[in-house]
Structure formats: C-alpha cells, structure tokens
Amino acid sequence: MRNIRLQAFLGALCGALWAFAPAVAGEDPTAAKPAKIELPKPREKADVDVLAALKGRHSSRDFDAKKPIPDDVLATVLWAADGVNRPDGKHTAPTALGVRHMRIYVCRADGAWRYDQDAHVLLAVSKEDLRARIARQKPFAEAQAILVFTSDLAAFDAKAARADKAMRREWSHYAAGAIGQNVYLAAEAFGLGTVIAAGVNAEEAKKSLALGAEEVPLYVMPLGYPKAISP
Ligand SMILES: Cc1cc2nc3c(=O)[nH]c(=O)nc-3n(C[C@H](O)[C@H](O)[C@H](O)COP(=O)(O)O)c2cc1C
C-alpha cells in the first residue's frame, strides 16, 4: 500500500515537472516578448587599442553556440558599428553626403531586432529565430547574433537628388564596408569572432525583417565567441 502511494506521488511529481518543462529548460515560447530592449551604455574603453585590434583582425566562421555575448559588449559592438558618436547625431561610420540610410538588424534566438542608433535601443521586428534562415552559410546559425546590414535607398533625400539608384546602391556598399570594419575591430577588442559575408537570403530578409519597399539587404556579420579548437 505504501509502495502504491509512493508510486502515485512520484507519478504526479513527474507530471508536474513535465508540465513546467519548457519554462525550466529554456524560454517559454508563448511568453510575451518586449517591443523594445534598452541597451546598456556602450563601453568607453577596451583593453585592446586600435592598432592591436588591426593587427589581430581576421575572419571567423565557427562559433561557440553556448557562450553568450554580455549585453554591454553587444551594445558596444553595435555602437562601434554605426552608433551616434557626436552631439550633432552623426555616426561612427561615414555615409555619402551624411545621409542616414544604413540600418542594422540583430537576429538572435530571442527574435530579430532593429538597432535604433539615436535611442541606442533594439526594436522588435520578429519573434522568430531567423539565424538559420537569413544567412546562407549554415555554421552562422551557431553564432549568438547575426547582424544584417541593409540600406534604405528611399532615405536618400533632396541632398542626394543627383544620385540615381545605381549610385545609391554603390554608396551603400561603401558605407557597409566601413560599418563592417568597425564591427571587425570592436569584435577583435572583445575576443569575439565575425566575418563580413555577402551570402544573405535576400527574399527571406525582406519578408521576415519587414524591410521597406526600397530597403536592400547587403551583408551579414555573424557574431560570437570562436569555437575552441581542440588540441
Ligand atoms: C565584399 C565581401 C564579401 C564577402 N563575402 C563572404 C561570404 O559570403 N562568406 C564568407 O565566408 N566570407 C566572405 N567574405 C570574407 C572574406 O572571405 C575574407 O575577408 C577573406 O577570405 C580574407 O580573410 P580575412 O578577413 O581573415 O583577412 C567577404 C568579404 C568581403 C569584403
């Protein structure tokens, strides 16, 4: 009799644990996600100076899927990429005629976000984990974050009236190159790995990131700690 009661108790306990399993094991897929994430202030110093970061800069394509990037490090990499660095609202990366046409999206396990440079916040654009869908290279899905650079050609205003669509696209690639190098150097300073990659699933990006009618996906940069190489 005692055994039967014990078995019934254990059975009920297992049932209860199973019911709570998603919350215990990881994120509850039904939980509401925030519309906005306030990012920590970007760090003002790193242990690696710019010349040492240039000396170490290299591309990495394999990432440690289990090692998270601290929030303040991600915030600093985003700021370094194309954040506001002056009181007049201008950015760490240059753009033709100072037109603000570059956008950065952050695809992570907890959804996809747009980096709002002025407010230094992440704005929710998708609740889905798009990492395996947005970049063509499969190992990039192991990166903690995939940065997606886009250019909104519609943002070129009267100042850039002389630039036709082809020139606006060309300028966008130059600006993306500058942002990409900023990401490489910031990543190097924090021991992160990254690579600038042209392999973007453009149709997927347009749909899942709800890009504007004239917003063009350009490059992706996976970001994460490099996978340890076995001795
Ligand atoms: C415009 C451009 C596009 C690139 N596209 C890819 C890509 O799709 N996939 C990739 O793995 N690397 C890509 N790379 C990274 C280069 O392969 C890499 O920079 C090159 O092999 C030199 O290696 P390093 O960056 O370590 O010096 C690209 C680089 C540039 C500048």
Image (cartoon, helix red, strand yellow):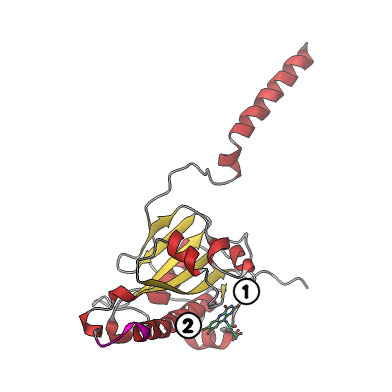
Q: Is residue 16 visible?
A: yes
| Closer-to-camera residue (136/188) | 136
Q: Which residue is label 1 attached to?
A: 61
Q: Is residue 165 magenta?
A: yes
Instruction: Give the total number of marks visible in the rendering.
Output: 2
Left or right of residue 118, residue 124 in this image = right
Q: Residue at x 21, y 81 (%)?
A: 158
Sequence-earlier tag: 1 or 2: 1
The quadrant where residue 199 appears: bottom right
| Closer-to-camera residue (97/91) | 97
**Whole-percent x, y for residue 134 in the image:** 53, 65
Q: Is mark 1 within 8 Å of ligand 1?
A: yes
Q: Is residue 186 magenta?
A: no
Q: CA distance from mark 1 to mark 2?
A: 16 Å
Main SS class of the magenta portion in the image = loop
> What kind of residue is marked 2?
Gln
The quadrant where residue 14 appears: top right
Q: Image quadrant of ligand 1? A: bottom right
Disc assigned to residue 181? 2
Q: Does 117 appear above or below 111?
A: below
**Whole-percent x, y for residue 80 in the image:** 42, 76
* Placement of the N terminus among the 4 image quadrants: top right
The secondary element bearing badge 1 is classed as: loop
The secondary element bearing badge 2 is classed as: helix
* Placement of the C terminus among the 4 image quadrants: bottom right
**Whole-percent x, y for residue 93 in the image:** 37, 81
Identify the magenta region: 162-166
Q: Is mark 2 within 8 Å of ligand 1?
A: no
**Whole-percent x, y for residue 61 in the image:** 62, 74
